[in-house]
């Protein structure tokens, strides 16, 4: 049973990682493309700058969280 439990935990870890990354990507696409925060005409406005700060900050936090989670 020990091997089956380890395999199950590993597969759950993979599925959770995929779900977290996909959710993050959906939120970024929604904000960046649908609400047009990722684009600017001539110069970036305060909403664009705030979006990119949020983008970079959440990317950093997600990577840090996943690195901790994958340390077995």
Image (cartoon, grey):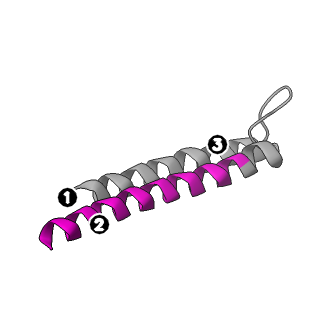
Q: Residue at x 56, y 52 (%)?
A: 22
* Mark 3 element type: helix
Report the front residue among 11 and 4: 4
Is residue 46 at all visible to an observer of this figure? no
Q: Per the image, is 32 magenta?
A: no
Give neighbour class at mark 3: few <14, some 14-19, many 20+ (Cα, 10 Å).
Answer: some
Q: Nearer the viewer, mark 1 or mark 2?
A: 2
**Residue 11 visible somewhere in the drawing:** yes
- Residue at image coords 29%, 66%: 8
> Does the magenta segment cover residue 14?
yes
Range of residues picked out in magenta: 1-29
Residue 31's label in the rendered image is none
As measured in the structure, the alpha-carbon distance from the residue carrying label 2 to the one carrying label 3 is 37 Å
Looking at the picture, how far across and down is residue 20, in whole percent?
50, 58
**6 or 41: nearer the viewer:** 6
Q: Is residue 67 left or right of residue 2?
A: right
Q: Residues within 10 Å of mark 1 (few under 14, many from 20)?
A: few
| Residues at discs 1 and 3 in contact (Cβ within 8 Å) | no
The residue under label 2 is 8
Find residue 10 and report its horizontal and vertical position in percent: 28, 60
Q: Secondary structure at mark 1?
A: loop
Tag nearer the camera, 2 or 3: 2
**Which residue is farthest right?**
41
Marks 1 and 2, how far apart at CA: 14 Å
Marks 1 and 3, the one that precedes in the sequence: 3
Give left or right: position of 20 versus 54: left
User: Image check: 24 left or right of 71?
Assistant: right
Distance between mark 1 and mark 3 Cα atoms: 32 Å
- Residue in the picture at 51% in, 52% down: 21
Q: Which residue is denoted by mark 3 in the rendering?
A: 52
Read off the residue under disc 1.
72
39 or 72: nearer the viewer? 72
């Amino acid at each position: 049973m020990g091997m089956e439990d380890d395999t199950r935990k590993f597969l759950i870890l993979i599925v959770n990682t995929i779900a977290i990354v996909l959710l993050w990507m959906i939120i970024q696409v929604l904000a960046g493309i649908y609400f047009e925060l990722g684009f600017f005409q001539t110069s970036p406005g305060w909403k664009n700058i705030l979006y990119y700060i949020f983008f970079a900050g959440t990317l950093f936090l997600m990577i840090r969280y996943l690195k901790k989670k994958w340390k077995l």
